[in-house]
Amino acid sequence: MLRAAKVGGVFAIALGLMGGCGDGGFLISTRQEIEIGQNVDRQLVSQHGLSRDRRAVARVERIGAAMADQARRTSISYQFRVLATADVNAFAAPGGFVYLTEGIIDFLGSDDDALACLTAHEIGHIDQRHSVEQLERRLGAQTLIQILVGGKKGADIANTAAGLVMLQHSRADELEADRIGVRYAARGGYDPWGMVRFFEKLRQKEGQGPSRLETYFRTHPRTQDRIKRITAYIREHEGGG
Ligand SMILES: [Zn+2]
């Protein structure tokens, strides 16, 4: 799994170093980031398959496009995919790829505002280049140099890079993506409190033992903390109450 992503990731990183600094102080340029994302995307789609629920796909694409209009990075073209799995999850790959599972769409029900907030949260990770930053930091300068001088086997480096692309985000990055999520939702005409409704729903399931939400809980900060912080943020910045 993720073999193409591994190869793509390393190739991109090596190019990044040779080409000097990428965008905004990053070694990996936007173009290279998109290449990494495309490789990850191919793997994810072949692993899970795309949803055949045309209504759900159209809904996600419509809401996703409204949220992408709010995004900061204009050099990225956002793409929204519904993966055919009952696992309740949402995530982003570098370069503009946003994924929602059939499971999370089912979990959210008809709440378009919550769907908008959640989609914008994922866009926020890409907008802030959270994965790229993490990838560069984890690999470190030494590894990046080793790629260039060939002192370390290409395959080893590739394994490291690919594993890191889809790693969980730090707590700080998650909370930042939450804030971006409600901000973009509000600016795009959706109710930012949809985020809180989603979290409240999550909280009811938290700590109830194994479920289809397991991966979600494992990779995200405690829901109670997110509710507290995002409630304060919405009251301060987005109005409403
Ligand atoms: Zn996140």
Image (spheres, rainbow, N blue to C red):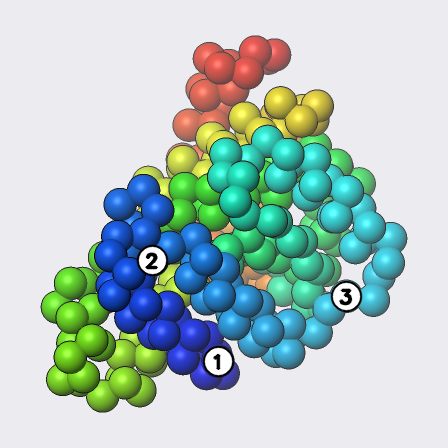
Q: Hey, what amino acid is under mark 2? A: Ile
Please tell me whether residue 102 is drawn above or below residue 22 in the rendered image: below
The quarter in which the C terminus is drawn is top right
The residue that mark 1 highlights is: 4
Please tell me whether residue 180 is drawn above or below residue 75 in the rendered image: above
Extreme residue in the front direction: 19
For disc 1, the neighbor class at 10 Å (few under 14, some 14 to 19, many from 20) is some
Answer with mark 2 or mark 1, whichever residue precedes in sequence: 1
Q: Is residue 186 left or right of residue 150?
A: right
Q: Hey, what amino acid is under mark 1? A: Ala
Mark 2 or 3: in front is 2
Mark 1 element type: helix
Q: Residue at x 40, y 36 (%)?
A: 176
Q: Which mark is residue 51?
A: 3
Answer with mark 2 or mark 3, whichever residue precedes in sequence: 2
The percent coordinates of residue 31 (x first, y second) are 46, 57
Mark 2 element type: loop
Mark 3 element type: loop
Mark 2 or 1: in front is 2
Residue 195 appears in the picture as rendered? no
Question: Rounded to the nearest whole Å, what is the CA distance between mark 3 and mark 1?
Answer: 22 Å
Q: Residue at x 55, y 52 (%)?
A: 96
Could you tell me if the residues under marks 2 and 3 are in contact, i.e. CB atoms within 8 Å? Answer: no
The residue that mark 2 highlights is: 28
